Image (cartoon, helix red, strand yellow):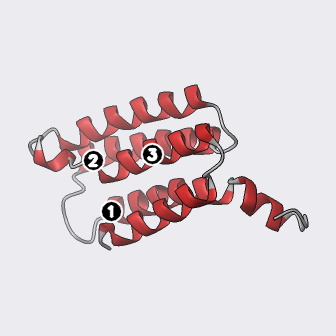
Amino acid sequence: MSHYWHLLIITVALVLNWGDRKAIYLTLIVGLSLLLPVASFTWRSNFYLVCGLFEILFALCALRINTRASQFVALMCVMLFAFHMIGWDVGGHPPDSPYRLLVKIAEYAEIIACALFANPTLRVLKNDARI
């Protein structure tokens, strides 16, 4: 999949979180973590290590921001760190590698969490009339 879907869901999450400054910061951090072109400034041999280190950094930033979605995003970052380390160890390069699928699932879970934990979305999910 292309970054088109990442951008679309990030935009939706930004719109839903418009009134909450901390949630916007978290959404921007998640967007940065997904759209950062790590491959352009790393080599194939250290790509997974650099990605893993960035995930730890983004997890710490998410916990520091401290919103409803922060703990979930930090958990996904820890999972992504583990996936990157496994990819580094066994080689996630082949197109049919499970690494690629697992990373995409965790990345989309981060973005969707930013949208689902937004105040308007939670009100709709709780059947609250104040939308």
Q: How many marks?
A: 3
The numbered mark, 3 or 2, whose residue comes first in the sequence reads 3
Q: Is residue 85 left or right of residue 122?
A: left
Mark whose residue sits in front, 3 or 2 = 3
* SS at mark 2 in the image: loop
For the residue pair 108 and 52, the one nearer the viewer reads as 108
How far, Cα to Cα, is label 2 from label 1?
Answer: 16 Å
Name the residue beneath numbered marker 2. Answer: 36
Mark 1: give few (<14), some (14-19) or many (20+) Cα within 10 Å. some
Q: Residue at x 48, y 30 (%)?
A: 61
Q: Give how far across and how far down residue 63 sits, in percent.
A: 58, 30
Q: Are marks 3 and 2 in contact (CB under 8 Å)?
A: no
Q: Where in the figure is residue 78, as x and y percent of width and height?
A: 48, 39
Q: Is residue 130 left or right of residue 70?
A: right
Task: Estimate the x, y position of residue 114 in percent, counting from the top left.
Answer: 59, 53
Task: Look at discs 1 and 3 and give the one toward the viewer.
Answer: 3
Quarter-of-image position of residue 5: bottom left
Q: Position of residue 100 (x, y in %)?
A: 33, 62
Q: Label 1 sits on what residue type?
A: Arg
User: Is 42 situated above or below 110?
Assistant: above
Q: Mark 1 sits on what residue? A: 100
**Residue shown at 24% from the left, 36% from the top:** 50
Amino acid tagged 3: Leu
Local packing at callout 2 (Cα closer than 10 Å; few below 14, some 14-19, many 20+) is: few
Q: Mark 1 or mark 3: which comes first in sequence?
A: 3
Above/below status of 37 relative to 100: above
